[in-house]
């Protein structure tokens, strides 16, 4: 089955009360996670540390350049992810919509490139 | 945020004086070891602060201990144990607590611990200067963790508001924890690159203090002292690194002439106009000695080359004849190792003396054509000097005016005006 990545975006500037409220929602997350696991679609999931802990890595020539911060500085940052094994995009969207985050942030759904979709010279040779 | 302030300095109180001395001499080492034990920057810092607070009353009633550092280490470790018992969010809490209690029961540290302690301050330096931290954060954190300055003093020295500096340092500590920046000395493969990063931080701190203008000098000169202290510490911890000695030499050779740069009338004085009796000759001697020591490794680097150039300037001012040919050669070498427009500019100025103003002007041409340097004041000042010496007062005046317009520093601007006014007399 194809895999989909659900990327959870939202604002980190939530105030203390709002943050506490979100933590109080943990049972909701636990419910969704349990049901995803029971359905056999959950591959991996994790919340991410604050974007303040991000480091961006670039290699230019022989130099590894590090930047203290995320790739793009925007108000909405990547806050967590799910890796789901779904039949199709519709199923992935359905699960995305069930995440509590979808109500105050955004969930970006990205299909994972399957191993058989990666173009390789040997595969091209047999196709021609 | 716990704002750790050192105990009041000076005064007739011998206990307060002993604590102030211990704060400067022992705090970094105690903190560095405790961070390794507890694995948490903030918790370790809070515990060390507790230990200093405890010392104030304990030393007053029991007297100042023979080895204040050892006393503080034991006290800080015990306070860390207390804090860790209360704080459930610490990673590997049970293991860390067990290890802390084991150390607490020990009369003397074992061999493993002894050799680990020797590297703790290096671990702390490399962690504070980690390239995944923003450069201003590296600077703030290094001064806070390893230097003897408070957050308020660092903020004043960098001309930012205290809460801004406080936030910067707290954020850096949080990133170290959250992003799992390791607490270690980089291995041999990474070391050259990471050491360059550390030296860059120290040099930046020094330059911030050194380039301070008249009005700022009092607060900012502390930065020179801190940079020197940290460079000396690094020499002690990494005595076989040529560039570490090179950087110390460079700082000493500049710092020795810091007060002589401004004349009694507040005017900026070039090296050859300075009152040499106002130079700190002992410091100059230390600088030359450090440079000697660096060059014996036969591993040239940018700081050694810059120090060698500075030493030649100093000797030139002392003897009345500057060896511009050798200075030009050193700039050639520096341009190979660390090419930059600043090096090119200085090389052109040196060639202007070694060969002649026309040769210097030719080397300036590509720099003057570079749009990125259009607003670089020293380029126009050097251009003006070369034009004046080449006998083109009209073009020289234009270049001086351009340099004056770009100058942000009062002392420097006055000097440029003076040079502009002498054009008419030439």
Image (cartoon, helix red, strand yellow):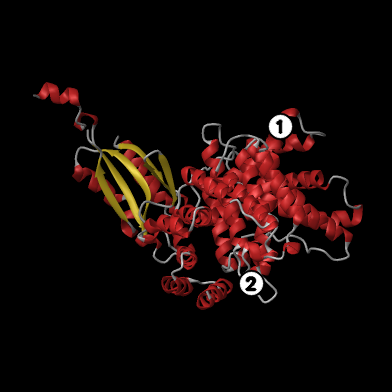
- B404 or B75, nearer to the observer: B404
Residue drawn at 57 percent across, 39 percent down: B300
Coordinates of residue B283 in the picture (x, y in percent): 74, 53
Q: Which residue is mark 1?
A: B115
- B194 or B292, nearer to the observer: B292
In which quadrant of the rendered image does the N terminus of chain B lie?
bottom right
Coordinates of residue B153 in the picture (x, y in percent): 66, 64
- In the image, B68: left or right of B397? right
Coordinates of residue B368 in the picture (x, y in percent): 38, 61
Chain of the residue under the numbered disc 1 shown in the image = B
| Labels 2 and 1: the sequence-earlier one | 1
- In the image, B426: left or right of B245? left
Residue drawn at 87 percent across, 54 percent down: B59
The residue carrying pointer 1 sits among few (fewer than 14), some (14 to 19) or many (20 or more) residues within 10 Å by Cα, namely few
Q: Which residue is mark 2?
A: B214
Chain of the residue under the numbered disc 2 shown in the image = B
Label 2 or label 1, whichever lies nearer to me, is 2
Residue furthest to the right: B62
Q: How many marks?
A: 2
Q: Is residue B410 above or below residue B276?
A: below
| Residue B184 visible somewhere in the drawing | yes
- Alpha carbons under labels 2 and 1: distance apart: 46 Å
| Residue B3 visible somewhere in the drawing | no
Q: Is residue B308 above or below residue B92?
A: below
Asked which secondary structure carries label 1, the reply is helix
Coordinates of residue B140 in the picture (x, y in percent): 59, 57
């Amino acid at each position: 089955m194809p895999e989909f990545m659900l990327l959870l975006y939202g604002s980190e500037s939530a105030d203390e009360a709002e943050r506490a409220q979100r933590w109080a929602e943990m049972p909701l997350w636990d419910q969704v996670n349990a049901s995803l696991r029971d359905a056999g679609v959950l591959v991996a999931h994790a919340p991410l540390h604050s974007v303040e802990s991000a480091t961006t890595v670039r290699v230019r020539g022989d130099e590894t350049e590090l930047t203290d911060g995320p790739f793009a500085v925007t108000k909405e940052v990547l806050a967590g992810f799910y890796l789901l094994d779904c039949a199709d995009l519709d199923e992935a969207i359905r699960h995305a919509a069930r995440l509590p985050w979808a109500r105050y942030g955004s969930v970006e759904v990205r299909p994972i490139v399957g191993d058989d979709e990666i173009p390789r010279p040997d595969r091209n040779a047999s196709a021609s | 945020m716990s704002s750790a302030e050192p105990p009041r300095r000076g005064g007739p109180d011998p206990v307060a004086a002993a604590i102030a001395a211990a704060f400067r001499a022992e705090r970094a080492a105690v903190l560095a070891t405790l961070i390794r034990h507890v694995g948490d920057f903030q918790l370790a810092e809070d515990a060390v602060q507790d230990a200093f607070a405890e010392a104030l009353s304990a030393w007053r009633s029991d007297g100042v201990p023979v080895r204040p550092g050892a006393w503080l280490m034991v006290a800080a470790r015990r306070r860390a144990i207390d804090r860790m018992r209360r704080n459930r969010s610490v990673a590997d809490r049970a293991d860390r607590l067990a290890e802390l209690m084991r150390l607490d029961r020990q009369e003397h540290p074992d061999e493993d611990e002894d050799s680990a302690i020797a590297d703790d301050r290096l671990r702390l330096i490399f962690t504070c200067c980690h390239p995944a931290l923003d450069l201003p954060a590296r600077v703030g954190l290094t001064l806070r963790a390893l230097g003897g300055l408070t957050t308020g003093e660092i903020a004043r020295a960098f001309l930012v508001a205290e809460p801004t500096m406080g936030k910067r340092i707290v954020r850096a500590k949080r990133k170290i924890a959250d992003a799992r920046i390791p607490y270690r000395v980089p291995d041999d493969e990474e070391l050259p690159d990471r050491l360059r990063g550390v030296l860059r931080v120290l040099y930046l701190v020094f330059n911030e203090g050194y380039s301070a203008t008249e009005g700022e000098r009092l607060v900012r000169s502390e930065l020179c002292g801190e940079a020197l202290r940290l460079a000396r510490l690094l020499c002690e911890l990494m005595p076989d690194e040529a560039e570490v000695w090179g950087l110390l030499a460079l700082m000493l050779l500049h710092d020795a002439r810091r007060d002589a740069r401004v004349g009694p009338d507040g005017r900026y004085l070039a090296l050859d106009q300075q009152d040499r009796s106002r130079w700190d000759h002992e410091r100059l001697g230390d600088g030359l000695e450090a440079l000697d020591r660096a060059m014996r490794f036969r591993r040239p680097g940018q700081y050694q080359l810059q120090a060698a150039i500075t030493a030649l300037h100093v000797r030139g001012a002392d003897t009345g004849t500057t060896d511009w040919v050798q200075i030009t050669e050193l700039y050639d070498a520096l341009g190979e190792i660390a090419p930059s427009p600043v090096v090119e500019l200085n090389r052109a100025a040196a060639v202007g003396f070694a060969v002649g103003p026309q040769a210097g002007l030719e080397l300036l041409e590509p720099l003057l054509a570079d749009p990125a340097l259009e607003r670089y004041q020293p380029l126009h000042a050097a251009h003006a000097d070369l034009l004046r010496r080449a006998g083109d007062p009209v073009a020289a005046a234009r270049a001086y005016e351009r340099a004056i317009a770009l100058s942000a520093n009062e002392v420097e601007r006055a000097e440029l005006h003076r040079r502009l006014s002498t054009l008419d007399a030439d």
